[in-house]
Image: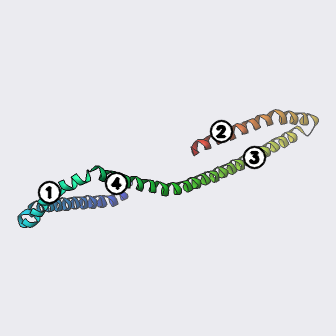
Amino acid sequence: MDPIELQKLQPISKYKKKHYFLNTLIFYSLTVFTGTLFCSSPLWFPSLFSSTKSFLFISIPKMRSFLLNPTCLFIVCNIIIVFLVGESKLVGSSSSSSAADIYDEYVKRSQNLQRFSSQEEKKESRKLEMRFTEETTQRVHEDGGGEKAEEREDIFDGDDLKRRVEDFIARVNRQRKLEAEQLI
């Protein structure tokens, strides 16, 4: 970084550190204050303390024995199962449509990729064709257009064209493999 940016960042970092310290200080202070009030509440509200004590030591054990009853557990478990089945049906219907959407998107992307690769192939073949015609015309002009030039052109057509076509096919196959790996 350049020195000007460092000078701009230093006050910001100091401000953030100061703000962070103040926020944590306030949070811990309020936590201690709330804890102190809660622990000292039986001293100022004796009636609240007695009702809390009766709730904790009398009502909860009675509710526990009722909730752990086999019939109550059976009913609660059935309610949970019904809820989960209902949710799965709702989610299942929407997930099948989303799966179809995902598949449609995949098909569109693969078609676009195929179009793109075919366009690239056409461009490459046009370039190769233009190079080939330029080279053959240059050779014809260099040789003076005689019969020997035509023989050379035939040899050039067969061997060099095959080599170039094979190179082009190999490049296209490599490109397709790379694109397939990128999709995965």
Q: Looking at the picture, does residue 17 appear above or below residue 131?
A: below
Q: Earlier in the sequence, mark 1 or mark 2?
A: 1
Q: CA distance from mark 1 to mark 3?
A: 91 Å
Q: CA distance from mark 1 to mark 4?
A: 25 Å
Q: Which mark is residue 173?
A: none
**Residue designated by label 1:** 58
Q: Position of residue 111 (x, y in %)?
A: 67, 51
SS for dot 3:
helix
Q: Are marks 2 and 3 in contact (CB under 8 Å)?
A: no
Lower position in the chain sequence, tag 1 or tag 3: 1
Residue 124 placement (x, y as % from top left): 73, 45
Query: Amino acid type of disc 3?
Result: Lys
Q: Residue at x 80, y 37 (%)?
A: 161
What number is the disc on residue 127? Answer: 3
* SS at badge 2: helix
* For residue 10, side relative to residue 1 (left or right): left
- Find disc 4 in the rendering and name its residue: 75
Q: Which residue is mark 2?
A: 174
Using the image as rendered, state which of residue 126 and residue 174 is in the foreground.
174
Helix, strand or loop for disc 1: helix
Q: Residues within 10 Å of mark 4 (few under 14, many from 20)?
A: few
Q: Amino acid at mark 2?
A: Arg
Mark whose residue sits in front, 3 or 4: 4
Which of the two labelled residues, at mark 4 and mark 2, occupies the earlier sequence position?
4
24 on left or right of 161: left
